[in-house]
Amino acid sequence: MSQRNESNRAKKRSPRPARGKQDGGAKSSKGAKPTKLRVIGGDMRGRPIVYHGEVFTRPMKDNIRENLFNILGRAVRGSIAFDLFAGTGALAIESISRGAVQAVAIEQSNRAAGFIRQTSESLDIESKLKILVGDAFRWSEQLLRAAEDPEDPMVGVPWIVFLCPPYALWEEELDQLNQIIERVLQNAPPGSVLVAEAEKKFEIERLPKGDWDIRVYGGTQLAFIEPATTCGLRL
């Protein structure tokens, strides 16, 4: 994946409502309406994903999600997907539909996690989708480690890591987000890919150095990176 720089920065705008942000028991927003969300491709193409239009989660737009998975291509098949700020769980679910052997959705909001669970049950993928409720930073420390047990069936299985936090976190918790990226680059098996989503105005140069492939869709940018390998070994 080759790097591409954006010369024109978007004008400042308010960050979108946080995806995966703790709801703190807040009541449903007035006027919230059910919104159709569906699996874009793969074995479950067209199947619905539960999303009720509430303010405590905002999913990635369908067209951006479709472009994301078109870029990932065959890398998803046979991988394990980590959706660190899951929201609706759409990225984890889409990964399973496209051939991931397992997916982990980490979501801090109990209500949002409940909706992911509903989708998992309706699609009959409970055996492949693990839902963890809690802080993505802490969970990533436990999950994004190199496998130590040679008998572990997941040894050598590539990772697809989705790092799509609430946009405000790229300013408020940049160091912690970069630690996640560094952890993936150091520990992920060959063939792995990390995808970071941020606003177009965010300066990708603030991420850890690497061969980033940048794609811009309206006010959103996706940054792809693969752990470097030499002779089959990670650098």
Image (cartoon, rainbow, N blue to C red):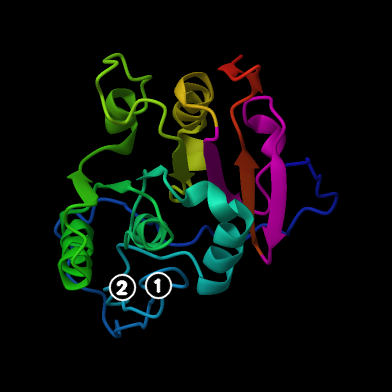
- Mark 2 lies on residue: 49
Residue at 54% in and 24% down: 185
Quarter of the figure with residue 121: bottom left
Among the two numbered marks 2 and 1 on one chain, the one whose residue lies closer to the N terminus: 1
* Label 1 SS: loop
Gap between marks 2 and 1, in whole Å?
7 Å
**In which quadrant is the N terminus drawn?**
top right
Q: Is residue 223 magenta?
A: no
Residue 39 - label: 1
Quarter of the figure with residue 200: bottom right
Mark 1 surroundings: few (<14), some (14-19) or many (≥20) residues within 10 A: many
Residue 167 visible = no
Q: Horizontal and vertical percent for residue 38?
A: 38, 76
Q: Horizontal and vertical percent for residue 134?
A: 21, 40
Q: Nearer the viewer, mark 2 or mark 1?
A: 1
Tell me which segment is drawn in magenta.
191-218
Residue 226 visible = yes
**In which quadrant is the C terminus drawn?**
top right
Residue at 26% in and 81% down: 30
Residue at 62% in and 26% down: 208
Asked if marks 2 and 1 touch (Cβ < 8 Å), the reply is yes
